[in-house]
Every structure is written in C-alpha cells, then in structure tokens.
Amino acid sequence: MEQGSLLAKISEASCNIRSVLEMAGSLQVTLKPEPSVEERELANAAADQYEQNLTVNEDLKQMLESNKDSAKLDAMKRIVGMIAKGKNASELFPAVVKNVASKNIEIKKLVYVYLMRYAEEQQDLALLSISTFQRALKDPNQLIRASALRVLSSIRVPIIVPIMMLAIKEASADLSPYVRKNAAHAIQKLYSLDPEQKEMLIEVIEKLLKDKSTLVAGSVVMAFEEVCPDRIDLIHKNYRKLCNLLVDVEEWGQVVIIHMLTRYARTQFVSPWKEDPASFSAQDISALGMNQDCVIKDGVLEEDNEKDFYESDEEQKEKDQKVKKPYAMDPDHRLLIRNTKPLLQSRNAAVVMAVAQLYWHLAPKSEAGIVSKSLVRLLRSNREVQYIVLQNIATMSIQRKGMFEPYLKSFYVRSTDPTMIKTSKLEILTNLANEANISTLLREFQTYVKSQDKQFAAATIQAIGRCATNISEVTDTCLNGLVCLLSNRDEIVVAESVVVIKKLLQTQPAHHGEIIKHMAKLLDTITVPVARASILWLIGEYCERVPKIAPDVLRKMAKSFTNEDDLVKLQILNLGAKLYLTNSKQTKLLTQYILNLGKYDQSYDIRDRTRFIRQLIVPNEKSGALSKYAKKIFLAQKPAPLLESPFKDRDRFQLGTLSHTLNTKAIGYLELSNWPEVAPDPSVRNVEVIELGKEWSVALGKAKKEKPTEKFYSDSEEEESASTTDTESESTSESEKEKNGKEEGSSMENSESSSEELSDSESESKEGSAKKKFKTTEESDSDDTEKKTKMISKKRESSGSSDSESSSTEESSSDSESESDSESDAESRKHKNAIASKRKQMAVPEKKASSKQDVSLLDLDDFNPVSTPVAVPTPAILSPSLVADLEGLSLSRSSVIDVSSPIFVPMKTHELLHRMSGKGLAAHYHFSRQPCIYGNQMVSVQVTLTNTTDQKLENIHVGERKLPAGMKMHVFNPIEFLEPEESITVSMGIDFCDSTQTASFQLCTKEDHFNVNIQPPVGELLLPVTMSEKDFKTEQGMLTGMNETSTTITVAPQNSTRLVLLEKVVKAANLGVVPSGQDNIHRFSAKTVHSGSLMLVTVELKEGSTAQLIINTEKTVIGSILLRELKPVLSQG
Amino acid sequence: MIHSLFLINCSGDIFLEKHWKSVVSQSVCDYFFEAQEKAADVENVPPVISTPHHYLISIYREKIFFVSVIQTEVPPLFVIEFLHRVADTFQDYFGECSETAIKDNVVIVYELLEEMLDNGFPLATESNILKELIKPPTILRSVVNSITGSSNMGETLPTGQLSNIPWRRAVVKYTNNEAYFDVIEEIDAIIDKSGSTVFAEIQGVIDSCIKLSGMPDLSLSFMNPRLLDDVSFHPCIRFKRWESERVLSFIPPDGNFRLISYRVSSQNLVAIPVYVKHIISFKENSSSGRFDVTIGPKQNMGKTVEGVIVTVHMPKAVLNMNLTSTQGSYTFDPVLKVLTWDIGKITPQKLPNLKGIVNLQSGAPKPEENPSLNVQFKIQQLAISGLKVNRLDMFGEKYKPFKGVKYITKAGKFQVRT
C-alpha cells in the first residue's frame, strides 16, 4: 500500500507541477490579448476562496447549527454543490460532522457524502463519527448495516483499520447477502488503505467465494482480482458454482467474473487448438479441416460433439473412448464455454465483449465464430462502443478472416462516421480482403478515395496498397489505379499515392520504368516532403532503369537543394551518391556540388550524412577499405517493405482489455498465461468428497432444490444438465425438431407454390395445374420427412459412433443438394420442348433451386438455433446476393449488348481421368462454349467417357463434390452402363463464380470412385457478346482506373495480320469480335458467365512489332489473369 | 475501477466532479483538453486516453463529455457502458441530460452517483431501484419539500435490490393496468449511385411501457419469431424459454424500458421504402453547379411515408444554393455547408422535387465527390421486417390488463451516395 500511496502522491505532485508549469508558460506569453483559461481559472478560484472565507462559511455554519432540519438540509445541499464544483469546503468539517447522527435520512446521506470526500484530510475529526457507524453496524435492518459498512470503509483513515477489519469479518458472515456484498466491496477499500492486511483479507475472500448468492459473486470476484489475482487455487472449488451462477449475476459482475474465468481456464485446461494431424480422430479432422463452405455442417457437427462429450462424461463410463481420443475437452472447460454463450445476447456491450474474448481465447477455433454476429450487432451502438469493438474485431480479423467475412458489408463506411470509426472500419475491410471479394472491395474503396475527408482518403490509399501486396492478382490493377490518382487535385492524396506506389514498386520492381518516369515529372508540382523524398529514393534506387532522366532530376534538385525540407535533402544526397556510383561521368560534378552544399547545411543530420557519403564514395588516399564496397553498400538489394496491419501484434494482449485498446501494458494488467502442456489435476474442482462418488450434476440438482428462488433463468438449463439420461434430452430435441419441421414444411410450400406460379404458364400445357400443385406440395412434404428422419437418425448415430458421423453429415448435405438439383433437372426436361424463350426457361429452375437452398439453410438453422448463426451468412449466401447486385448493375446499363454465338470452338480436350488411374475408365473434357442449358451462370462442359476395359462399366455417376464457396455444379445423369471400347459424351454445367478455382468431384462407377478436378482456363469463363464500336467505347470509358489493366507486348511478325490475330485471340478466349474502324486496333468483347460483367479486350498494334494490350473489366482478377494468358498467345508464333 | 468522474461542457468548463476513491486533481483533465484540441471535431476525441498515471475514458452525450479517471486495467467497454448508463439515468430523472438540468439538480445527481457506484464498482444501476432510493424531482414534490422540509429520499428502504428480481420495485399498484409495446424498426442502408442497395439491414427494438400491479408474469409471442435472428435482451427475459419456444417470457420492470433489440440483416428481406432520383453536378471551370433531387415512395406496403427530411453535407467549396422546392421548405447553412430539406409527407401523385443552382466559391476547384444524401422518414403502423406480435399472456395476477402494440418504421442511417 505504501508504494501505492506513494505513487498516488507522486502522481498528484507531478500533476500539480505540470499545471503550475503550464500556468507559468501561459504567463510568459505576455503578448496574448486575452487571459488564458488557466489564468482565468486561477483568478476565479482565488475570488471564490476569498468570498467563501468571508461570507459563505459563516453563513453555512450557522445554518448547520440551527435546530431546524430544513435549514440544515439547505446548508448541506449548498455544501454538496460546492463539492461538486470542486471548491474547497474542508473548513466546515466540524460543523458538518456533528450532524452525522441526524434523524433525517437525507441530511444523513449528504453528511456521508461530505465525510467520504474530506475524512482523509481531517482524520482526527473524522474519528468523531466512527461510533455512530459502529452502532449502525448492529442495526436489525440489513440495509442500514450495509450502508454503515459502506461509509465506514470509505473513510480513508488509517487509524480505524482494525475497526474496519473487524467490521468486514463480521459482515462477511452476515445473514443478508446484501451486507455480504458490501463486505466484499469493503475488502478492496481496506486493501488499498493498508496492504498489510492482505493475508487476513484473503481469508475473508476465501470465505465469501464460497457464497452461493448471486448478489455476492460479482463483488467478491472483483475483490479477488484486486487483492490476490495470483491465488488461482482459491477458485478451484468455486469454479463450477461460478459457471452455473453466471447467468443470474448482475451484468457488471458478469464482466468481472468472465474475465477472471478466462484467466483461470488458461492455466487449468489444455489447448483445444492442438493441431497434430496424426492424433486426430476422424471426427476432429472433419470438424476442423472443413472448408468455409461447410460451416453449416461444422456447426451441427460440433454440437453433436458437444453432446457426446457430456453424455460420455456425465455417465463416467466411457473411459475407453477417452483413451482413443487424444484430445477430449475437459467437461469443466466445456461447461464454461456453454454457460457463457447465452450472455452473448446481453444488452450490455461490456458483457458481450467479455464473452467474445472468452470464446476467442478459450473455445475451439471452429466455435469461436458464433461471437461475430453479436459483435457486429454492437456496431449499431454509440460511437465509443463502436470504436472499442471495431478495434477488437480488427485484431481478430487478422488471424481469422473467416469469422467476419460474412459481415463484410457491415463494415462499409458512411460519410457521416467520425474519422476514427472510418479508419477502423477500413482496417477491417483490408484485413478481410481476399481473392473472392477484392473486386467488390476495390470498387468500394474507389468511393472512399474521393471522400471529402482527406485524412480518410489517404488511409484508403494505404489500404489499397496493402491489398495490392497481399493479393498478387490485383497488384497491377491497384498500381494502375494509384497511378491514376497521381493526377488528383488534392495534394494529400497524391502524396499518399506516391508513398504507397513506392512501396509497391519496391515489392516488384520488374518493369515499371514508365511509372517512375511519370513520377519524376511530378517532382515539379508536388510539394509534400514525404512524397518528394519517396520519388527521389525511387529514382535513385532504380536509376539504371531510367538512365536518361535520373541525372536530369539530380540537376534540378541541385538547384533547389537549399529550399528543400530536411527529409528531401537527405534523399537528394542519396540520389547523388547512387548516381555517382553508377554514372559518374555525367553526375560527378553535380554530386560534388550537392555534397558541398550539404557540408554547410544548418541541420547536423545533413552535414553528418554529407560527410559520411563523401568519405564513402569519393576515392582518396585516406578512405579505407570501405569505399571499395560503396557500390555494394548503396545499391544493395533492399528487402521490400511489408505492408502490415497496425493491429498485427495487438493479440499479445487479452482482447477487450484497456491494454489492448492502448496497445501498451496498462497498470495492473494481468497476463493471460499460455495453455499448459499437461492439464493440472482436474479433480481439484470437485466440490466435496461425498459428491465425488456421485455425478456432480446430481449434486447440482440438489443445490437447486435447496434454494429454488435464486435460480431465475437457469431453471430449465439446470434440469437439462440434471437429466443424465440422454434419451430424455434427445426426445425433447426431437420434438423440437418435429415442430420446426412442420413450420418449415409450410414455408417450403409457400416458396414452392410461388415459384410454381411463375412456371405455370409453361407446365399447364402438359398437366392440369391443380394436379401439379398438389403434387409438388406432396413432394416437398415427403422431402421434409425424409430429411427429418435423416437428421434424427444421424443424431442417433452420432451418439453411438463418432466415426460414421462426419460422413453422414456430409452425405446428408450433399443429398439435399442433389435433391434440389435433380428436381430442377427434371423440371427443365419437362419444359424443354414447350418453351420458346430459352433464357426464361433457364431462369425458372435456377430460381427454384436457389430458393430451395435458402429454405434448407433456414432449416438447419432451426435444428440448432444456437450454434449455427455463423452458418447462415457464409459466402455461399453472400455471393449470390452480391452477384444479384452485380447483375443489377450490368443489366441496368448494357441493354444493347447481346450474347452471341462463339466464333470459334476449340476442340482441344483436357484430360479428366487417365485410363490407367481410372482402372480402365478414361474421361476427357472440353469446353463447348455454348450457353449452358442448366443455368445461365454456368459454363457448359462436355465430358467424354470411354471404357477401355473389356468389361461393362456400370452406373457411372458423379459422387461427392468438393466445391469452393459459391460454386455450383450440375452433373450429368448417371449412365447405366458403358460397353467395352464404347464412349459416350455427356454435358455438365459448372458455375465457377468467375474464378479459376478448381471444381473437384468424384467420378464413380459401381465399384470405384476416382477424384478428378476441372480447372477452367480463364478464357472459358466468358461468353462472347456483340456490340458496336461506339458502345464498346462508351463502355470502355466507364471502366477505367482500377478496372483497366494494360501491358505492352512484342507481337510475333506472323501474328500481325488481322485474320491471324483474330484467330489466335478467339482461340485462347471465348471473346466476340467488335467491328473496328481502324486497321491497327482490334477489339473484342465478352461478358463473364457468372456475373455478366463486361470484359473488353483491345489490341492496338504499333510500330516495330509492339502492341498495346488493354483489358477493361470490373472483374479485375479475371482481367489480369486473362491479360497474362493473352500475352504469350500474341508474342509467340 | 472508476476513480473519479468529471463532467465537462463544450466550452471546456469542468462543471461537476465526483470522486469515489481519493481525490484526483482537476489538472488530470488537461490531457483530455489536449486530445480534444488535437481532434478538432468533438466526434473524433478518442474515447480512451493514456496519461502518465491515469487513463481517461470518456463518452460524449448531449454536448457533455463524461470523463472518467481510471488507474488500473479495466475493460474499457465496462466503463463506457456504465457512463452511458449514468447519462441514461439523468435523462430518465430530469427529462433531459443537459448541463443546466444537471446543475439545477446537483444534489440529486450527487446522490445518484453515490448510489450507482461504490468504490468505483457499479452497485445499483437499475432505474427501478434508484427511483426507490431517490425519488425523481417533480414540481409538486419540490413545492411540498420546500414547505414541509421533507426530502426526496425514499422513506422506505428499497427491497428490490435484495430480491431475485432486482429490476422490479416491490408493491406496485395501479388502478388502470396497462401494457404497451412499441415495435420500432430502423432501416440502415447505403444506396449507391445507380440506385441499387449496397448494404441494408433492419435494426429493431421493442420499447415497453408497463404499468401493472403486483408481480405479473408476461409472455409475448410473435407470429413470425424466426425473423429475429440476432437479439439482445433486457435481463428480465428468460433466455431458455426463448431458446426453446421463441416466446419472450418475463416479469417486467415497472415503467418504461427496452425489452429487446434485434437485427434483421438478410439483405433480400429489407424493403427500401423510398427511392431518390438525383442529378448533382459541378461544371469544370465554372462557379456553379446543378442540383436536382426527387424523392418518391417505393415498396411502402400501401402506407404513407411521412416526416421525410433530406440532409446533405455539401462540399466545402459551396458558397450558397438557389433552389426551388415543389414541396416542403429547405434551409442551407452556409457555415456548416449543410442543406436541410424538410418535406413532410410524400404523395405519390406529385413527387417532391428540389432543384436549382449551386454557387461555388469563384476560383475554387470543382469538388471531386458529390455529397451523399442522408434521408430520414417515418412510416406509421408498419414494421418493415414484417414482424408481428401474436399475443400477450399474463400469469400470476387476476386482473385483466389493457394491452396495446404500436408499429413504426423509421430511417436509421440511411444514406444515398450520388
């Protein structure tokens, strides 16, 4: 304590000194026309003091001594007003203290207020009041006892420490939980007054920790954290109780308890994150190794897992199972994670954040995702809450992108957000950027760059730079976009762009001579020192790439050297030195001139640098061996800067703490320990020896009976955990499911019938519509029940054997998918002949399938409403909506553009399955370049299957599919048999989502299944469109900046004729030819299959067999890949 | 935890201080003023400031900074949430949380702060309990008090604090028993230049006013509870019941309180009730620009859109605006460069339009970005998400309460990029 009080005194003293200094400072500035704030305050304070001393005090004293309560009350109110304003009222102490025993409650309370404020200063007089409190401590009314203890312990007078200690001890054994709560508060107060009492206080804490009242729990844990946070052993016995009480504790207590339990758990349990593949059971692998698109399954699975653990544990019989599993979560660990989950729905942001950090630090990685939704909810809250939550999300999003990816749009910036919120959001958006969403993000960033808030615009440019380095596909695009920004009017924007471009060029200095030249020109106009310095550094570093310009720049800089900023001067010196070493003939004199200027500069930094450089580069007798290596020193390969998030190492602090927010260790920060290698003995948490024999859940049930009033919310939960027989819990969950199933059935009906209405016009020709309607509803019903039973049986299975589980989940999901598929397939078959417009027909089943999928997702959600919230907005859903967005965009403006038939269909086939590895089954595929009949977002693929064996191959079909998020696939109908030496061609549709990701699936025969995959060349992700040259130009005009990528290539001579060039290009990519007025410019247009974004390709032949290749598209990723692929096509013969 | 609290007004005067542990000198606020100066805008003052010996955590509410002094590690949200709770309590007690209200009621404020925090740890933050301890000021009471000299301290000691339902005060009695629920939904959206929705979600709350005698146990059920996918609850709600049956079951606090707040985020569920057509352009090398905005109803389920206000933060270079509106009135603040167009009700027959000339400072470069439009509106009798209350049942008491539900949809952060 002495240390503490010393610190406090020091701090106070330093504060005083500081304010005095400041006053002194302000006094010094005599030129100020008005008195400064401090001066005025000083004057006011002095005047107040004066006034107070003369009149008010006497007045008040008299009032306090009067017989009337009303006068006393009036006086006390005025005194409190003085205290509130920070005025000194200590003189009145004797007069006030007399009233401590007043009968009037309000006077009494106000006297308490006064006492707490001044007792420390007037210790002797304060002792007068003690006896009153001591009497009150024995009062029969618990509230009076409590408040007496509160005031007594708040009077910071060291002499009464023994009295306080006694009072606390007594109060901690009080019958009233409210008094015990106050005792817990008093512990901290006494501890801060006299740390010597620690040992005794710990005894009291130990006693109070055992308390079963929810009122006490929060306060005593607070006291524990303050007095003896390292005595983790005190928690053992109370751990389970705290976990179970948690929901009923008041919200402030919850925060404290959760933080304490997080620390506790990190010392007591082994890490649930261990990733040792060899020791995984099949279950774990499927749970952890799943892709993002399988989160739904994941959720279900985990939930099952969870149940599994409990059941096995509560029954304490499945020890053999435990032996099999290398990692099984300690049931106590699971208890904590489970019991904190409901609190995510608290109205208190601090509680939600506390749970979120607990999940982050303790839960298995697959489960931590459930907190993201709640955190995103907090973003609606006040500015301050947003700020803190965004910071924490930023830290989380670096390590686990997947958690917040579905909520990408929640972090979009509004122009009305405060700058600090904007930058935090931007930080998160940058962290979340990946190949799939980068084009959307870059479009969003384009809006931000134009923002009126220039500080934010600059931050956006940095963000673009970071995206460019992290995602190599868009580097060129970003670079081009940034170069465009160089012509911006705002200097801050230009400067920031220069700095970012410099960093980008450094990461890949391949062929950017042009950009460097461009930037060299900027030197004439730009004035921001950092930007000038960056340009100079770039020119110096790559002076060999711009041999003509560099010396000229040096000449110009030599002229303006004296007027430059120090930062720029240093870079001029650098540039001089580098040029001197590479091109001494031209620059020797210039460099020496600059060195001479530098020698007499005002800044010692520059003089110093000058001296250093001169010694290093100018050879003379005196210079040592070092000058021989000057070239190596100056022109060494510099490592490229890593553009990293400023939140990168924040995770060394526990999330949600002050230290995390400040990014420095705050006073009293308690380190979160690493997981122990081996878990300490878990039996320490067992409550009593007698109970150890039984299951402790039964003990809990007992506890509940003892004090039924205390459990308010957790009733049903208690029951649940008390029900040891798994059948019971299962039956309830089953009935729940059934209910949901019913509901879902009706909703399904709805969606079905609504889509039905759409397709009616077509189907009526075949069957009576009424009949059909009936049929479909029936169908959906039966589907339902089927699914339901499947789920249930799956649950059953899962409790039995863990191995079969993963496969069954996967199966069921793939089943449901194929169900919808086959249905839509059948539908489309039926309609095939009847319909005139092809497109419309395709739209119908497509829509149906998607609506259906939505429904099934909702279903899963219902099966377990708690655990799957992550699942709902996975990319699978997000991307269609995004796609819809994009579609809306492209439709709205490109009404003139029609899909045309391909000009050229390459016959090149790709191998899908070699006959050796396929046990005789060979498969090849090629892209037919026709609009796919299965869906207008799909690419049609022709697969040729050949039987090279001498036996019949039966039942050839597509089995399990592993598609990246958002990708869809329409498979061919199973082939019943394939005769030896026979081959058959079937068509499939694959929606690649406009990416070159691989579609993997299994090709199955009756006996075997083979893993195969199809990766589309980027040229096949397009559909040719026809448009006029004029349209092309207007479209191109809209797709500039970030949306444009270009390169210069050397064209092989034989390619330079029009026909050959056209042939080559359309062969490489499915592009349509746009008629062109000029002979040397060739234009091609297409749209992407999935999103329908335009892809405009221009080849402009120039003199000397070079050509400019330009691609304009919103889909920047595909654009740059296409650019890369077209390059060799044109340059090779 | 929380050491001291300073209330600071916009002009930088510390008008109230309260210490829960030893006294911290006012000079600690200098660090805050320093940060405030650096931030330029009040909105940008960082909520957490580190000083050599203390940490300052602040919130900004109703033109007052609540600055708390912290000495050791504490979750910052804990403090922020508490400070907001303090501001809410002031609002609740005095009708407004302004500097004058606080100064006028300084004694009550002090008494409240004393009860809310003990040694820096929150003690009683439920409004029901606080009101039992300290009665809120009313004109009648203050007159009576000044005559009889009685106090605004509760005569009876609060029992709510001791019960297992700490949010409800004991022995409630009403002659008319009523329970009202307001379902209020706000649409947050970003609409891009071409009119398509970039981002949209619905933020809903159910605010309740419950004046029921005794200990009623209510359960509120919805027609379509599955709409609510992300909900936060008042502590009175039984969580397990919601989990299993999707029914809100609770013993309510007495008076006004927020029962739940929820979020409907799935984008296709969010109907956007208005559309905005806009042409805002600035000519290169000329000191004027065009401004033409029309607003019309869309997907409003046959309800009238009313209380429409469009606010535009014009670029700095704008000098003034000469506009004519077909409906409503507009004002342009030439200092803040804010255009406010108060339209009122939208009638589909004649769409409100505001157009005219924007004058720029001569010589200033053409603004790069068009300003975004912030739209406010209100639709009565409609919850845009389609949420519907099914029924309210009461158990535990015999009388028949009067029940009522009101729906309203509003624009939240509704922004149209141009």
Image (spheres, helix red, strand yellow):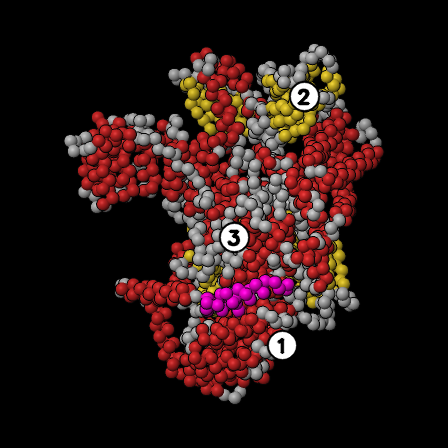
Residue A196: in magenta span? yes
Kindly report the secondary structure that dominates the magenta region of the rendered protein. helix
Q: Are marks 1 and 2 on the same chain?
A: yes
The chain letter for the residue carrying disc 3 is A
User: How far apart are the alpha carbons under marks 1 and 2?
Assistant: 86 Å
Quick one: A1052 or A277, which is closer to the camera?
A277
Query: Relative to A263, is A72 above or below?
Result: below
Give how far across and how far down residue A670 sits, in percent. Answer: 48, 55
Q: Amino acid at mark 1?
A: Asn
Magenta residues span A186-213
Q: Which mark is residue A141?
A: 1
Alpha-carbon neighbours of circle 1 within 10 Å: few (<14), some, or many (≥20)? Answer: few
Q: In which quarter of the view is residue A564 placed?
A: top left
Chain letter, disc 1 residue: A
| Residue receiving disc 2 | A987
Determine the image quadrant of residue A569.
Answer: top left
